[in-house]
Amino acid sequence: RVVSLCLQGTSTWSEKELMQQSNHQLLILPLRNPPSLFIKMDLDRKVFGQHLAIQIVLRALSANMRSKRPRKPLVMSFHGWTGTGKSFVSSIIAENLYRLNIPRRKFVHHFSTVLHFPHLSHIHLYKEQLQNWIRGNVSACPRSLFIFAEMDQMPHGLIDSIMPFLGYHEEIDGVYYGKAIFIFLNNAGGDKITEIALDYWRSLKRREDIPVKNSLFSLPGGFFHSQLIQKNLIDYFIPFLPLEYKHVRQCVREELRMQGHPEDEDLIAEIALAMTDYPSEERLYSSKGCKTVASRVALSI
């Protein structure tokens, strides 16, 4: 019986092939296809209006996975308004690193600040539990993925407890962390990102012309006074731009398809127009991104 299955990236192994390996308690399978290829296909097809985030994420993952033994874990921080695709992109990464549901549940770890760390008085316990969880799971599977949501609400000092695992170490107490991936999801910095995008629009420049090397990529929001910033342990600060009317239309169209409904152009325009509400005069962006699209479509059918 397969107790746990650790895939070193994405895989096209069939269920039959997996069962032939069932005499191993811990099964580590080699790659048959580069995961960045599958991730790129999904990001290009499913994520709207985030050309900058897609570019940086793909570069980061490709660089990390090309190395047989990375010098440090890959640490990315996603910043932007709610509904712009931060969680969605992290789920696409997870789905493609682990193509089967069983290993994905075991080796992709989601942490919600509100759910998992609600009490400030328990911060010392949280630190110990978090360290033990990361240490134990990376020991079981070096290519573990850890996703932390609501970083802007994280109790002060808690995230610093995992700092030793994110640095340049060959091993820590016999455990190698270089293949692990850490993703932080953060609403902080969203207003600044929107301001930069809005300035481009008001200057009659396309959002696609915003360069990758822009000041918005050094946003420390949600990590104020954190040792992760002071020690330069976050490899990439990745901005998620506010979504325009045309992007919300794409979201609505995709949601209609997913719910099995025909593409009603009038309905698509109606929902997208209602969601495009910022700034109050120009009504260029959706302040909630595509977050409420599914419920709006369900109510409108």
Image (tube, rainbow, N blue to C red):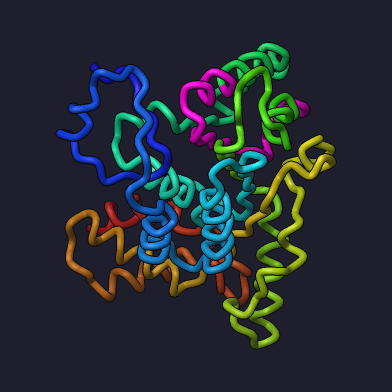
299 w.r.t. 56: above or below: above
User: Among all residues in the image, which is located at the extreme front?
Assistant: 68
State left or right for residue 301 relative to residue 95: left
Residue 25 or residue 36, whichever sits in front? 25
The percent coordinates of residue 132 (x first, y second) are: 60, 16
Q: Would residue 75 be found to the left or right of residue 295 on screen?
A: right
Residue drawn at 66 percent across, 56 percent down: 190
On the question of residue 288 being in view, the answer is no
Residue at the (54%, 30%) spot, across then down: 111
Residue 161 in the figure: left or right of residue 287: right
Q: Where 156 falls versus 264 (above or below)?
A: above
Question: In terms of image quadrants, where is residue 218?
Answer: bottom right
- In this rendering, would 287 be left or right of 195? left
Q: Position of residue 3 (x, y in %)?
A: 31, 17
The residue lying toward the viewer, choosing from 115 and 144, is: 144
Residue 242: x and y in percent read 57, 64
Between residue 290 and residue 63, name the one nearer to us: 63
Q: Is residue 295 above or below residue 210?
A: above
- The answer to whether residue 150 is magenta is yes
Quadrant in the rendering for residue 150: top right
Kindly give the residue lying farthest to the left in the view shown.
Answer: 16
Q: Residue at x 34, y 50 (%)?
A: 295
Asked whether residue 140 is drawn in magenta, I would say: yes
> Viewer-proximal residue, 301 or 123?
123
Q: Work out which quarter of the rendered image holds the C terminus and state it.
A: bottom left
Range shown magenta: 134-158
Percent x, y for residue 107? 43, 30
Q: Quadrant of residue 205?
A: bottom right
The N terminus: image quadrant = top left
